[in-house]
Image (cartoon, rainbow, N blue to C red):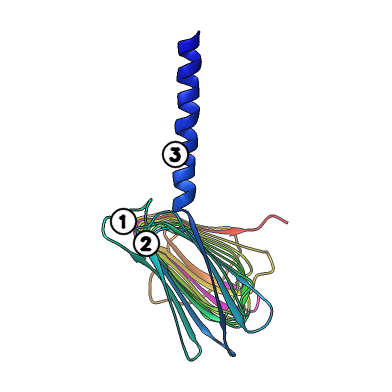
Amino acid sequence: MYRKQHIATVSVVMILIVAALAAAETTRKEMHFKVGRRANISIVNQYGPISVKPGVGKRVSVTATSYSGKVEIDQSKRGNRVSVVSHLLQGADADSGRVDYEVVVPMDANVTLHTATGPLHIEKLHGDLLLEGSTANVDVRDVSAGRVHVKTLNGPVTLTNVNDAYVEITSVSGDVSLHEVNGASVHVNSSSGKIHYDGEFGEGGQYSLTSHSGDIEAIAPSFASIEVVARSVQGRVDNDFILQPEHTSFVTRAGSAFAGTVGQAASSVNLLSFSGKIHLKKREQ
């Protein structure tokens, strides 16, 4: 009985020691910068999440939480540019090199985020956005009136409620989901990832969804106003809309290619794949 109690006591002590050492390694650093209109904010973080939200006034606040002594936080401000970089020291890995960033910026700020593992999250901004990652989940929501550029290798990308924007997404194998994304130009290109669009194809824009081998699903309301072209060389192509036919540079064949207009054809829509399936679906009311 005594031996069991002794073992239990030693175990508890060891757990407390490990927890204390971990807490001692955790460092929280806060940085504040005063900026002007349309400031450029750059965060480079090899490992760990970056979350960016709007604040009040012309101030940038960055809170960085690191979990070991194998990473340093470098910061600089030159004119209207703010840069924060996670500097990895020798021996750092995905765990010891992790830094969690919480960033508050003016609503009109231009933001650039670079990471390997992420995730990356931006919301409610009106400036230009550039997000790059390898396996990072990318989540952009409630933004407008700017340019949104996303580049990933195999991390999934989700855009929600993006309006009056220029959108360009490039991914090797990550799935891309667009929900209520409208603008003058919306281009998505993925080698093997799936592409899902659910919106109105509004704003009189140009929409291009292209995947070499991934499936493409585009959902639009019955009142959509689009000129649409859909082709897949080896995959099946389906359409739920009644189209007014148009002359094309290729032969339209049921199940593999179609082209035509719906309504006033205010927006241009291109759905292209080599071997993936394509489906233009009518949203159920």
Instruction: Find disc 3 in the rendering and name its residue.
Output: 18
The amino acid at mark 3 is Val
Residue at the disc numbered 1:
92
Provide residue 83's location: percent of width, then percent of height.
44, 78
Specify the label residue 249 is tagged with. none
The part of the image, by quadrant, that contains residue 98 is bottom left
At label 1, the amino acid type is Ala
The answer to whether residue 273 is left or right of residue 107 is left
Query: Which residue, as the protein is rendered here, is positioned at the far left?
Result: 90
Front residue of 163 and 245: 163
Inspect the image, locate mark 2, and give the three-letter code of the amino acid beneath it.
Val
- The reply to whether the C-beta atoms of the residues labelled 1 and 3 are less than 8 Å apart is no
Q: Quote the CA–CA distance across marks 1 and 3.
A: 19 Å
Disc 1 is placed on an element classified as: loop
Task: Give the magenta range.
Answer: 261-275
Instruction: State the residue at coordinates (48%, 41%).
Output: 19
